[in-house]
Image: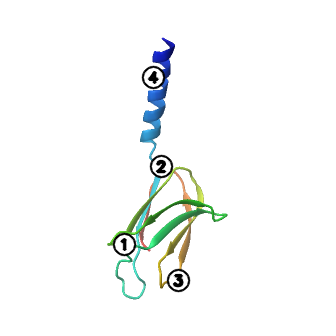
Amino acid sequence: MKRILMMAVLTLAITVTAFAQGVAITGKVIEKDTKNAAASATVQLLRRDSTFVGGAITSASGNFNIKVSKSGNYILKISSIGFNPYTKFIKVGTDDIALGTV
């Protein structure tokens, strides 16, 4: 009986963890001068103390998607070879954030 109860609790914990999605931060990175998509740019999400939280590499069309599991204040940093880094302060709550074109 204890084994069955333990398996049920473990299965429930795994299921809840699997369905925990967090908040998605999405956007599209373009080059300022040409307005072309910035493929393979590095997108980092950092805490205010610059601790790495998550990141992504932009697709060929410049799109990125980062998942965040905790609300709070973050720094979004976008960098690519040959370009100056771009930073933006972001407040993450419970809703997904669509930054649009960056």
How many numbered circles does the render carry?
Answer: 4
Q: Helix, strand, or loop for circle 2?
A: loop
Q: What residue did someone put label 1 on?
A: 62
Q: Helix, strand, or loop for circle 4?
A: helix
**Which one is nearer the viewer's eye here, 34 or 81?**
81
Residue 22 bears which disc, if any?
Answer: 2
Type of amino acid at the residue the image marks with label 1? Gly
Residue extending farthest to the front is 3
Residue 86 image offset from top left, x and y in percent: 53, 77
Q: What residue did someone put label 4 on?
A: 8
Q: What residue did someone put label 3 on?
A: 84
Residue extending farthest to the bottom is 33
Residue extending farthest to the top is 1
Left or right of 72, for residue 101 = left
- Sequence-first tag of 1 and 4: 4
CB-based contact (under 8 Å), mark 4 and mark 2 = no
Type of amino acid at the residue the image marks with label 2? Gly
Q: Is the residue marked by circle 1 packed among few (<14), some (14-19), or many (20+) residues within 10 Å?
A: many
- Sequence-first tag of 3 and 2: 2
* Quarter occupied by residue 40: bottom left
Give how far apart the Cα atoms at labels 3 and 1 are.
Answer: 16 Å
- Sequence-first tag of 3 and 1: 1
